[in-house]
Amino acid sequence: MCYPLFMGNSLVASIGMLYHCEYGSAMFASMVCLILAVWAALVVLRVWISCFASMEGNPSKRELGESSASLPKILPVTGEPIHHTVPLLATRIARHEDRLNDIVNVINDIPCGHITEDVNNLMISQMAMEGQVELIKTEFSESMEFIAALCSASTAMGDVLTSFDHELEQISAQNFSLRRAIHESHARERTRDRTIETLTTKITELQRRMDEASGKP
């Protein structure tokens, strides 16, 4: 007869473990709410039946509230006095104690063990899922570290390429200066050649005039 209470304790423990899981899903939450509702309904029905089943026989005048010291209270739905209706209801329930006991036995015989087993299986699946999530988180962290290392290497490579670009600019400027110096040197050589040619022509002309003046043929 204590099976619902035992099942309730097992379910509460299972539900508590599910509640503390970090990665609960909507399916787990729905099943937990359903299990809680069923278990609570069973417990409340059992307590209610146990309380009213102990009341046997017809109510006395004192139970029916025939005393004139208290004012009658009326039920809002049926309009009957509460002090008449409640004891009569309790008496009728007591008269059907055997039938209520049969109902209790049927409730106790409900195979609810598979619910706890399903919850335990869900817990095992949840723990396996959490393990996979932790593994994915670890792999993701390692990937992020590798990406960070690649970013650092890329930054260092960018600095090296920037230094190379600066050196190339300097080499290009020096090359331009050398080309300009060579061009100026060629221009000076051409000027020198023209000057030498002009001087040679003048010397030749001067030598010819000197020869003519001295009577040489």
Image: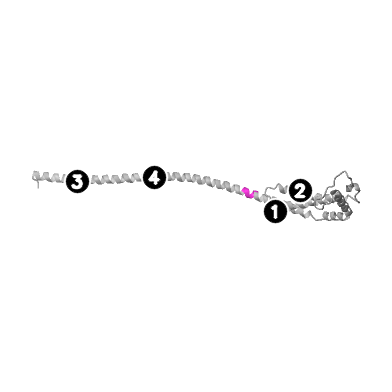
Residue 125: image location, x then y, percent: 70, 52
Amino acid type of the residue tagged 4 in the rendering: Ile
**Which residue is pictured at 40% across the width and 45% down the height?**
169
Disc 1 to disc 2, C-alpha distance: 17 Å
Q: Which of marks 1 and 2 is nearer the N terminus?
A: 2
- The label number, if any, that marks residue 12 in the structure image: 2
Where disc 3 sits, the SS reads helix
Segment tinted magenta in the rendering:
134-138
- Front position among marks 4 and 1: 1
Q: Which amino acid does label 1 sit on?
A: Met
Would you call the spot at circle 1 few (<14 residues within 10 Å), some (14-19), or many (20 or more)?
Answer: few
Q: Which amino acid does label 2 sit on?
A: Val
The numbered dot on residue 171 is: 4
Q: Helix or strand or loop: what does disc 1 sit on?
A: helix
How many neighbours does mark 4 have within 10 angstroms: few (below 14), some (14-19), or many (20 or more)? few
Q: Mark 1 points at which residue?
A: 27
Q: Are marks 4 and 1 in contact (CB under 8 Å)?
A: no
Q: Distance between the residues labelled 3 and 4?
A: 40 Å
